[in-house]
Amino acid sequence: MIGRDQLAKMKRTAVLINAARGGVVDETALLEALEGGRLGGAALDVFTNEGAPLDPIVQKLALHPRVVCTPHLGAATAEAGDLVMSEVCNAVKAVLDGQDPGECLVQGT
């Protein structure tokens, strides 16, 4: 979605933030824009190949002086934890009451 063409339209002082999904930003194009001085910086919380060991592009991005990387922690807040706990409790209560818990990946038999 965000590749060379989109990055080329950004101001040289712009900072790109991706906390959405890996793959939304072409990481190779991002690195090229940063190294070419065509982008002010980047903050990345997600990556295309998360968990892939020694991805050379991600390594270069992580070491770049104008890039801040976090390990997919964007939603790791007290508020998000409270929301998850509430949703889990509601789903467990629904099951105990003999009701459909809602959003299940696999329905029980």
Image (tube, helix red, strand yellow):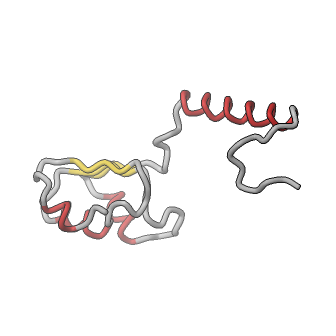
Residue 99 position, x and y percent, is 82, 37
**Image vertical order of residue 29 relative to residue 20, above or below:** below
Which quadrant of the figure contains the C terminus? bottom right
Q: Is residue 70 left or right of residue 90?
A: left
Q: Nearer the viewer, residue 33 or 89?
A: 89
Q: How many marks?
A: 0
Q: Quadrant of the N terminus?
A: bottom left
Residue under the point 47% across and 70% down: 54
Residue 18 is left or right of residue 71, and the answer is: left
Q: Quadrant of residue 102?
A: top right
x 76%, y 56%: residue: 106
Q: Indicate the position of residue 70 as horizontal and vertical percent values.
A: 43, 48
Residue at 12%, 48% (x, y): give it: 13
Q: Residue furthest front?
A: 99
The picture quadrant where one finds residue 90 is top right
Residue 103 location, x and y as percent?
Answer: 68, 46
Residue drawn at (29%, 70%) of the image: 28
Locate residue 93, reporting x and y percent: 81, 31
